[in-house]
């Protein structure tokens, strides 16, 4: 959770790993004064850039922070404990690290940015501005680069993953939804379900608000969400592989450029 030494050392680990895999890794440090944590915390974004000079780029992003409070836990005594975030946070990051490892070997015909957003999950009902701090900051920092599109990964690790069309994505970036789900269909990956899903406010919103097409890949049907039970035990490597395979295919074929 932000504002702790393990948070900072986790970031150092992630950046170190990305630096082994990508030609350019940039970081950005900023702060958020959290009324709920009753302190100002230091937040860090990172981006690993493949073909850093390419003009045509796509961006895959995930939040790497974990929520300081398990406020949906069924046990009241747990609600002030931090969420481990195996699915809510780490699943998307795990996919991006593996995508980086693959892209280092395969190369890519266009620019690919793999972004890690901090401070996605610092919001509360009283202080919703604590949500999406990192992605909001990222758009301010790099938004003028205008990637062709953005895919946000969140909660992609649960067993029997079912990714449906998130409503904001479908309304504001339906052509990218079609592109991604068609890619999955061609690959025979059945976790991508062609049916309407819930409306979720996530790290894709700041991009959509800036006019950048962005899609949230999320399975929000997750009973362990914001509980102390969001651990690796409820996650599946097969789900991570399914999502990563679609991303690698999009990044390496870039067949959408000719469509
Ligand atoms: Zn969350």
Image: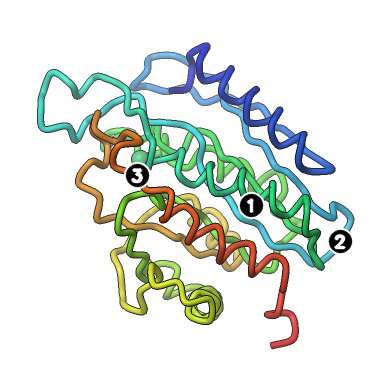
Q: Are marks 2 and 3 in contact (CB under 8 Å)?
A: no
What's the residue at 53%, 53% (across, down)? 206
Residue 180, image x, y percentages: 53, 73
Find residue 54 and name its label: 2
Q: Is residue 119 left or right of residue 196?
A: right
Compared to residue 247, the image places residue 132 above or below, namely above
Find residue 37 and name its label: none
Find residue 235 and name its label: 3
Q: Which badge, 2 or 1, is on the more N-terminal residue?
A: 2
Q: Kindly report the distance in space between the C-alpha atoms of the residues bearing marks 2 and 1.
A: 18 Å
**Residue, disc 1:** 99
What's the residue at 56%, 23% (across, down)? 10
Snapshot colouring: rainbow
What's the residue at 47%, 42% (across, down)? 132
- Identify the image quadrant of residue 148: bottom right
Quarter holding the C terminus?
bottom right
Quarter holding the N terminus?
top left
Q: Residue furthest bottom?
A: 259
Q: Is residue 184 left or right of residue 210?
A: left
- Identify the image quadrant of residue 53: bottom right
Q: Cβ of disc 3 within 8 Å of ligand 1?
A: no
Q: Is residue 226 left or right of residue 62?
A: left
Q: Relative to the observer, which residue lies in front, 205 or 189?
A: 189
């Amino acid at each position: 959770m932000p504002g702790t030494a393990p948070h900072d050392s986790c970031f150092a680990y992630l950046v170190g790993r990305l630096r082994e895999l990508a030609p350019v890794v940039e970081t950005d440090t900023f702060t958020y004064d959290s009324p709920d944590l009753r302190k100002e915390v230091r937040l860090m974004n990172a981006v690993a850039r493949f073909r850093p000079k390419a003009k045509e780029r796509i961006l895959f992003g995930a939040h790497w922070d974990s929520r300081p409070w398990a406020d949906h836990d069924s046990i009241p005594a747990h609600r002030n404990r931090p969420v481990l975030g195996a699915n809510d946070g780490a699943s998307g990051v795990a996919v991006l690290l593996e995508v980086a490892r693959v892209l280092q070997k395969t190369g890519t015909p266009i620019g690919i940015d793999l972004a890690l957003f901090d401070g996605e999950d610092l919001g509360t009902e009283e202080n919703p501005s604590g949500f999406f701090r990192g992605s909001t900051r990222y758009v301010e920092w790099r938004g003028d680069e205008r990637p062709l599109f953005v895919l946000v990964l969140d909660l992609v690790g649960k067993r029997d993953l079912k990714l449906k069309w998130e409503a904001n994505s479908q309304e504001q970036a339906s052509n990218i939804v079609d592109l991604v789900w068609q890619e999955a269909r061609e690959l025979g990956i059945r976790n991508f379900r062609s049916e309407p899903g819930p409306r979720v406010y996530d790290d894709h919103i700041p991009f959509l608000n800036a006019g950048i097409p962005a899609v949230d890949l999320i399975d929000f049907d997750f009973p362990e969400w914001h509980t102390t039970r969001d651990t690796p035990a409820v996650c599946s490597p097969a789900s991570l592989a399914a999502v990563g395979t679609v991303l690698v295919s999009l990044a390496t074929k870039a067949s959408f450029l000719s469509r």
